[in-house]
Amino acid sequence: MIEVKDLVVDRGKLRVLDGFSCSVPTGSITGLLGPSGSGKTTLMRAVVGVQLVRSGTVTVLGQPAGSATLRHKIGYLTQAPSVYADLTVRENARYFAALHGLDSAHADQVVVDVGLGGAATQLVGDLSGGQRSRASLACALVGKPEILVLDEPTVGQDPVLRDELWARFRQLAVDGATVLVSSHVMDEANRCDRLLLIRRGELIADDTPAAVKASAGTEDLDQAFLTLIRRHGDALEQGGLPAGEER
Ligand SMILES: Nc1ncnc2c1ncn2[C@@H]1O[C@H](COP(=O)(O)OP(=O)(O)OP(=O)(O)O)[C@@H](O)[C@H]1O
């Protein structure tokens, strides 16, 4: 569904991704984890087709990322909410639905699905941070995308809402959508089918949560994450990776 091959991306003077390759399977939830600044957003931008890349390829549904034919098939939730502050939640959702040729009733349902039914007529500019982020999520979901790229979608949400949003992501995947989601929350990572762990623009794990935990020798994903990050850091400092490991 998403194939990234030998991707090199520079941002400013920094090489953020340096020969990065991965693939994301159809109808699944793939979690993107990694320390702050490791390149998760940059990878997502490349998948959506809004990132200038130096070399390598990103193929989405068999098309080069950014192709015009993909625009109606991808929903992208950016970290900073991208909705109109001077429109209500409902007006925003209806506007984005109309761009996809979908009706108001569908838009109103998506507003309810993200837990904003009670705030549908409020101006987005008057919402709390968590509510604004969910308004943005509604607009990313409203086009019924085949591919959903979500950059930290549950930041600022309470545990009940987080649980409901993850149930929603799971349902979308069950219905056939491919979900790529970044997070720093390990109980969310545990809910993914696969995890891509990035450190300094390199892929250091690409496996199921269970296999990631097994390879770090712990049942705790937080601990596994720390172990793998440190192991990779130590390996780099020693000028190579431990015997038997591939970079
Ligand atoms: N516009 C930019 N110009 C220059 N450097 C940038 C720019 N945007 C990001 N970077 C740098 O690129 C690197 C990767 O950033 P990116 O946003 O992809 O990280 P991230 O893994 O998503 O981080 P976080 O978890 O904090 O969101 C960082 O070192 C960041 O400082």
Image (cartoon, rainbow, N blue to C red):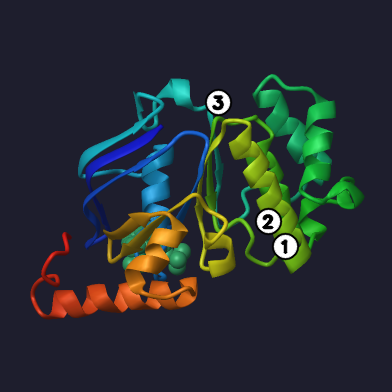
Q: Nearer the viewer, residue 198 or 46?
A: 198
Residue indicated by mark 1: 130
Query: In the visual, does 5 lie left or right of 127?
Result: left
Distance of label 2 from label 3 (alpha carbons): 21 Å
Decide which of tag 1 and tag 3 comes sooner along the chain: 3
Q: Nearer the viewer, residue 14 or 20?
A: 20
Choose the circle earlier in sequence order: 2 or 3: 3
**Residue sitting at x 77%, y 32%:** 94
Query: SS class of the residue under badge 2?
Result: helix
Residue drawn 55% across and 25% down?
72
The kind of residue tagged 1 is Gly
| 247 horizontally vs 102: left or right | left
Return the residue at label 3: 72
Residue at image position (56%, 34%) is 177
Along the horizontal axis of the image, is 30 left or right of 82? left
Q: Quarter holding the C terminus? A: bottom left
Assign a secondary structure to mark 3: loop
Q: In percent of the image, x 82 and y 36: which residue is there?
A: 109
- Name the residue that disc number 2 marks: 133
Q: Are marks 1 and 2 in contact (CB under 8 Å)?
A: yes
Q: Amino acid at mark 2?
A: Ser
Q: Position of residue 127 (x, y in %)?
A: 80, 59
Quadrant of ligand 1 in image: bottom left
Asked whether mark 3 and ligand 1 are closer than 8 Å, the reply comes as no
Instruction: For label 3, count other residues whose C-alpha is less than 10 Å away and answer few (under 14), some (14-19) or many (20+).
Output: some
Q: Do callouts 2 and 3 mark residues in contact (Cβ within 8 Å)? A: no
Residue 120: percent from left, percent from top: 87, 46
Q: Position of residue 236 (x, y in %)?
A: 16, 74
Quarter in which the N terminus is drawn = top left
Secondary structure, mark 1, is: helix
Report if residue 34 is visible in the image.
no
Label 2 environment density (alpha carbons within 10 Å; few <14, some 14–19, many ≥20): many
